Amino acid sequence: MARAVHAAMSRAWLIGAGPGDVELMTLKATRALAQADVVLVDDLVNPDVLQFARADAQVVYVGKRGGHPSTPQDGIVAQMLEHAQAGRSVARLKGGDPFVFGRGGEEQQALRAAGISVEVINGITAGIAAPAAIGIPVTHRDYAQGVVFVTGHGAGSGEPDWAALVATRMTLVIYMGMRRLNDITGALLAAGMSADTPCAAIESATRPEQRHALAQLGEFANAVSRAGLGSPAIVVIGGVASLALARDAVNTGAVGALDAQ
């Protein structure tokens, strides 16, 4: 009975911390963070955002990052439930947006099933912020009538239908695709995408260490490899990538160039 009462009194937030730059975090996110007793922080969150947390808040690091050791998802959910059922308010702080490849939907389900009130606070997702950081709009009337966000992490039965995606003629924004870039570009070429399609990869977007590489699809994987770019990074494939700012017009490192520039 006591546990049920605690759960009813508890509150949880799924907070998007944005792409990296602290100033891109929303006001609502900072206000919620200031109320939490416990903050569970993902690996890709800029630690500077913790300035908005209470000085006495318990901060728990539960990194979730492809290719690196991380806390199992069921373990994260268990910690959230444990704190909330003990009557503590819990903030789950995620990079980008909690509902865009952030597993926020799963966490929301678990919290609600336990009778815990949960609020989702959106963040700016890297799939929009990273391209914008180098001047790429993900949609443009002259280049693409839409954009598709897709994970490049899966393989085998989890592989996206690249042929279907090519057929949409929309901008492709790929999360978690750096380790499989050779496979992804090969699949796109095999599905009929032109080898001269403009592409961009943006690493550590909106942070001081941001870098990017530009190339056409046929040479893209090699260009990214030569540049030494790695995760976290966003990949943009489509005509809009030709609008990336010239190398001398950005304050961040750029490697490679589109032939069209």
Image (cartoon, rainbow, N blue to C red):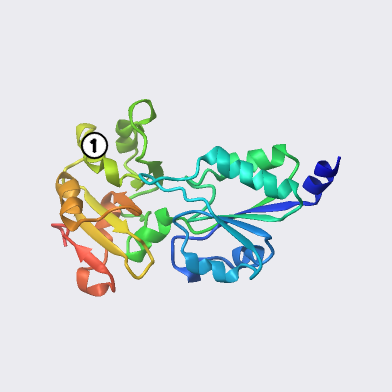
Q: Residue at x 54, y 50 (%)?
A: 98
Q: Can you name the residue that lies furthest to the top here? A: 157
Q: Nearer the viewer, residue 47 or 208?
A: 47
Q: Nearer the viewer, residue 184 or 132?
A: 184
- Left or right, 65 with respect to 233, comes to right
Q: From this view, report whether residue 215 is shown above or below residue 82.
A: below
Which quarter of the picture shows residue 212? Answer: bottom left
Give the position of the N terminus as an image quadrant.
top right
- Helix, strand or loop at label 1? It is helix
In percent of width and height, residue 136 lies at 32, 60
- Left or right, 115 with respect to 205, comes to right
**Number of numbered discs visible in the structure rendering:** 1
What residue is pinned by disc 1? 183
Q: Nearer the viewer, residue 94 or 137?
A: 94
Q: From this view, report whether residue 235 is shown above or below residue 132.
A: above
Q: From this view, report whether residue 110 is shown above or below residue 45.
A: above
In percent of width and height, residue 57 lies at 65, 64
Q: Residue at x 31, y 58 (%)?
A: 203
Amino acid beneath label 1: Asp
- Left or right, 72 with respect to 69, comes to right
In percent of width and height, residue 59 lies at 58, 60
- Left or right, 187 with respect to 89, comes to left
In percent of width and height, residue 161 lies at 34, 31
Which quarter of the picture shows residue 134? Answer: bottom left
Q: Residue at x 35, y 65 (%)?
A: 133
